[in-house]
Image: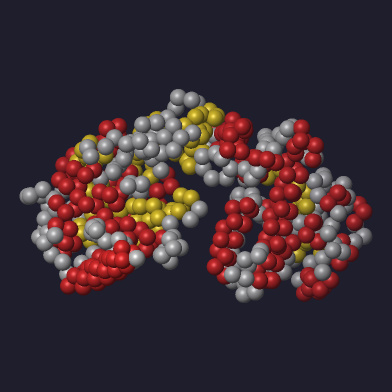
Amino acid sequence: HKDMNNMKAVPMITQILAAFTHQPLSIRRFSTVGDRQKAIASKIKKIENSRKSIVGVLHGSASAKSSGDVNLDQDLNYTLPTIAIPNSEISKVIQSNILKPYFPECFRHVFPKPKIVRDFKQSNGDVQKVIVLDPSTFGMDTNDSIFKEIGIDTADNEDKSRISERFPGLPSHLATILEDTHHAKPGPMVSIEIPRSQIPLDVLLAEILPPDALPPPSGFEEIGHVIHLNLREQHLPYRNQIGEVMLKKFGPENGGRIRCVVNKVGQVGGPFRTFEFEVIAGNDDDFNIELMEDGTQLNFDMRYVYWCSRLAGERKRMLEQEFIEGQVIADAFCGVGAIIVTAAKKLGCNVIANDLNPDAVKYAEANAERNLIPSEKFHVECGDARDFIRSLGTKGKTLPDHLILNYPLDSCSFLDQLRWWPSNGNVETMVHVYTFARPDSKTDRSQEAVAIDTVADNLLPEGGYSEKTINRRNELDELGCMVRVHEVRDVAPGKVVLCVSFKATGLLIKHMQGEFIPKSYQARSYRVMNRERARMKRSSKADNAHKLT
């Protein structure tokens, strides 16, 4: 709140609040500090009210949680007040949003959401429309109305035929509009049952975790029939309970397909980019994954290969926005072949691929065969990516239309192998390099500028200069590279994966081979060299003065 006057702090505050509340929160539209603070306070209050309402039904009393006696198998049962509105007026009331602030908060975190407008059959057989309300939003005594059976408190309210009398907590002007304009009357208490499968995961987990383990884990990756978690330290003592709750919610018991829940215990690393994990719920020997992505059937054993379901959107973007039917696609780190198999299947692309992991190569070939890809259009080899990239420029070979380097940890270091390509090739390959990047406050560079500079430094390294050149995008564009940057996903606070795409033009290859230097680059080089000479002269004068002293 101290930095709320600083507009640059607003996005960060938004992310912090969204992380704590698990809800998207937009506060940029408010022009003053007071308005933003009111919006924040209102949002948090609504979220707390809805969770308290769900929690109240879930364990019935405050003592249940402390004793650990939380029944996760029971459904939620609500008895809520309503307002009866004639059929001809119901759409006008809903469209005017005058009752929106009074809709049940407990429905906000439930999916699919229960209907706010319901049909209620009267004793004479007629059906009337009623709108369900949340009694806590207008000060109605929840002990007398909510969580009770129908009819338990209706006898005391039969005489209260006007909305202003039945719901004294509603603003008087609102009650007048409803009664006089829309001919509304107090409706009956209605019972609503919400299946456990619709209760949010974080609400279920909050009921089994102690205060020191809150907030509960909310993010996970679904890999076929396996849920993959990356639990924080405070969650580890309760990992088995967390796994059991997730298995119940997403498993066969609720019509889901999850049979196993695992937690990562090591970092992605090693030459094959695999990681160690432990089973915290379900089958402990069922890791043969079968899944469908974008119409492509894939099969692999997650213990021996790298896989990331969160890259499905990026793979789809490449297929729809970058690749063209019939092109040649080269992938230096192909893994089990998710993007290349789909490109061959949907676009008829010719594929040349490579991976250092022999298991990944085996699964990529099997997945191509499974999806009926002709062998002459799909070639995968097992070897070092440097050798693979260099071999693409072998005399007599046609360069690919696209080269994918999806190894964010070290993709850029492989770019120097492009210098072995012919500078007079008949194809200008579009290279897609994936890399990690963070904004650099010291040099006032964005994460995009940092990523481009990393690519440029590996394509065109500057040797011998003490002052490193930054913001080299224009330098690459002068060589015809047409650099583009796309943000793929966040991996840590302030750290993202970016895809830097550029054309490997003949001018770029000549420059890498030392055969050609553009005039603009010569001028820049001379400027850097002159600055270096001036620095050396100043240093020399200082040394001489010291010797004379």
Seen from the viewer's position, the closer of residues 132 and 181 is: 132
User: Horizontally, is 517 left or right of 239 in the view?
Assistant: left
Give the residue at the far front of this rendering.
549
Residue 4 picture quarter: bottom right
Seen from the viewer's position, the closer of residues 407 and 465 is: 465
Residue 255, position as x, y percentages in the image = 55, 37
Seen from the viewer's position, the closer of residues 28 and 423 is: 423
Seen from the viewer's position, the closer of residues 476 and 28 is: 476
Residue at figure coordinates x 70%, y 62% from the top left: 41
Residue 259 at least partly seen: no
Quarter of the image that includes the C terminus: bottom left
Residue 496 sits above or below residue 338 on the image: below
Residue 232 at least partly seen: yes
Residue 521 sits above or below residue 392 on the image: below
Residue 121, position as x, y percentages in the image = 75, 53
Residue at figure coordinates x 22%, y 36% from the top left: 382
Residue 57, position as x, y percentages in the image = 75, 43
Quarter of the image that includes the N terminus: bottom right
Residue 361 sits above or below residue 172 on the image: above
Residue 80, position as x, y percentages in the image = 78, 52
Color theme of the render: secondary structure
User: Horizontally, is 295 left or right of 110 in the view?
Assistant: left
Residue at figure coordinates x 29%, y 52% from the top left: 412
Residue at figure coordinates x 75%, y 58% from the top left: 133
